[in-house]
Amino acid sequence: MRRFLLLGGSALLLSGSSALTPAFATTGRVAAAESSQPVELAIRSVEGPEVLEEQPLKPAAPALPIATPSEEPRVRQVSRGQASWYGPGFYGGRTASGEVLRQGSLTAAHRSLPFGTKVRVTNLNNGRSTIVRINDRGPFHSSRVIDLAHGAASQLGVVASGVARVKLEVLQ
């Protein structure tokens, strides 16, 4: 008996019969029979018979431009030198820009670049590179050009050795 009721209800639903309660009705989009313009169907009343009103669809929002990998930022300046890293002992402390240093951050310290500058750092020993944001001052060792936060050092493979030869590309 239960199977019969389920099949009977499905048959009524598929046949478009108005014998079903309005709770089964939904709002959807269909194409008008006489026109190629799509219309939106909206239920006006739940208590009485279904009343559908045709409304033209709103035009879609214009698509936003999507950056492709070929659209790389321009390089303003290139330099080479030694990079070191700093991390666990400094977590939770404030950088020179006032930010709190967090584990895994892709930030770095540089002596003269403005805070917020993006720099692509490439490890010349293994070819790995990452983009960091300058948010601190340093390094305080004369032979080094940049101090990497632990997250950036991990991506570049500098953690085990402590220092590495790098190429810095200041991005626009």
Image (cartoon, rainbow, N blue to C red):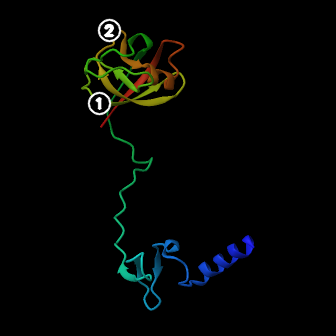
Look at 39% across and 43% down and name the residue there. 72
Q: Which mark is residue 143?
A: none
Mark 1 surroundings: few (<14), some (14-19) or many (≥20) residues within 10 A: some
Quadrant location of the N terminus in the rendered image? bottom right
**Left or right, 31 with reference to 56:** right
Where 82 falls versus 45 (above or below)? above
**Left or right, 80 with reference to 112:** right
Look at 34% across and 73% down and name the residue there. 58
Q: Position of residue 131 (x, y in %)?
A: 40, 31
Q: Which residue is mark 2?
A: 140
Q: Position of residue 133 (x, y in %)?
A: 34, 28
Where 146 falls versus 11 (above or below)? above
Look at 26% across and 24% down and name the residue there. 113
Where 56 falls versus 117 (above or below)? below
Mark 2 surroundings: few (<14), some (14-19) or many (≥20) residues within 10 A: few
Name of the residue lying farthest toward the front = 1
Could you say which is closer to the camera, residue 104 or residue 26? Answer: 26
Look at 30% across and 18% down and name the residue there. 95
Whether pointer 1 and pointer 2 mark residues with C-beta atoms closer than 8 Å, the reply is no
Q: Which mark is residue 117?
A: 1
Q: Give the residue type that dot 2 points to.
A: Phe
Q: Position of residue 143 (x, y in %)?
A: 37, 9
Q: Give the residue type that dot 1 points to.
A: Thr
Tell which circle, 1 or 2, labels the residue nearer the N-terminal end. 1
Classify residue 15 by image quadrant.
bottom right
